[in-house]
């Protein structure tokens, strides 16, 4: 019996071979996200085209810092994001501004899309809930630090953004932002992609 399947990208797979979507990676993590903030366990899911999340959580806030919208991340990303918020971001905010960050604009977490939204490109880590983007830091006083403007903004803002970005490297396996390429001028991208050499890719 021939099964006709329409490939989701490229349109090249028109042979009789069944399209095999990439496997959704297993996710292990050490800390139960319930200890890290307002989160909700959701059922693991996959869309049959390679996107989906294992050990999936919906995150409303982490370490007392509110997300601009509820985001879906895998458990390992929740752990890493919470660690970065508590150990890197808040100390940097106290250091530069003398106050804490109360909320983060997170334009993207789980999203089934190719890298950089470029058609035909490899599936983004966002497709596995293994990445998060941060575009704005909102502080207690109402001050906000936007990645796009702040990168070329006051000395304090520039230093703050540079340190939260640099110190994310290692904790996250990929860190991108303004200057990385034309796709990251207005946000910081953090993910836990496993790179071939086992190291981190930060630029
Ligand atoms: Zn991203």
Image (cartoon, helix red, strand yellow):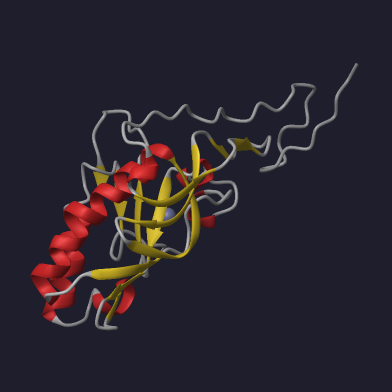
Q: Residue at x 78, y 31 (%)?
A: 14
Q: Quadrant of residue 157?
A: bottom left
Q: Residue at x 41, y 38 (%)?
A: 75
Residue 176 position, x and y percent, is 31, 55
Residue 48 position, x and y percent, is 68, 34
Q: Residue at x 37, y 70 (%)?
A: 186
- Residue in the foreground of this view, choosing between 68 and 195: 68
Which image quadrant shows ligand 1?
A: bottom left
Q: Is residue 70 found left or right of 145 in the rendered image?
A: right
Residue most extreme to the top: 1
Q: Judge whether residue 203 can be spotted in this image.
A: no
Residue most extreme to the right: 1
- Residue in the foreground of this view, choosing between 129 and 78: 78
Q: The N terminus is located in which quarter? A: top right
- Residue in the foreground of this view, choosing between 177 and 37: 37
Residue most extreme to the left: 95
Q: Residue at x 70, y 42 (%)?
A: 8
Residue 158 position, x and y percent, is 17, 73
Q: Is residue 157 found left or right of 187 in the rendered image?
A: left
Residue 149 position, x and y percent, is 30, 79
Q: Is residue 2 found left or right of 76 in the rendered image?
A: right
Q: Judge whether residue 189 can be spotted in this image.
A: yes
Q: How many marks?
A: 0
């Amino acid at each position: 019996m021939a099964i006709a399947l329409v490939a989701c990208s490229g349109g090249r797979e028109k042979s009789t071979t069944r399209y095999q979507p990439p496997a959704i990676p297993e996710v292990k993590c050490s800390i139960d996200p319930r200890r890290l903030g307002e989160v909700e366990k959701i059922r693991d899911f996959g869309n049959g085209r390679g996107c989906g999340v294992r050990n999936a959580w919906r995150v409303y806030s982490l370490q007392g810092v509110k997300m601009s919208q509820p985001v879906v991340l895998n458990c390992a990303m929740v752990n890493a994001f919470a660690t970065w918020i508590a150990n890197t971001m808040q100390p940097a905010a106290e250091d530069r501004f003398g106050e804490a960050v109360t909320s983060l604009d997170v334009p993207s977490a789980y999203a089934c899309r190719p890298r950089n939204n470029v058609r035909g490109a490899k599936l983004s880590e966002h497709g596995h809930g293994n990445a998060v983007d941060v575009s704005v830091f909102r502080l207690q006083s109402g001050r906000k630090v936007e990645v796009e403007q702040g990168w070329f903004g006051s000395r304090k803002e520039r230093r703050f953004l540079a340190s939260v970005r640099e110190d994310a490297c290692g904790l996250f396996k990929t860190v991108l932002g303004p200057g990385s390429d034309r796709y990251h001028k207005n946000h910081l991208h953090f993910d836990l992609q496993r790179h071939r050499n086992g190291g981190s890719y930060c630029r």
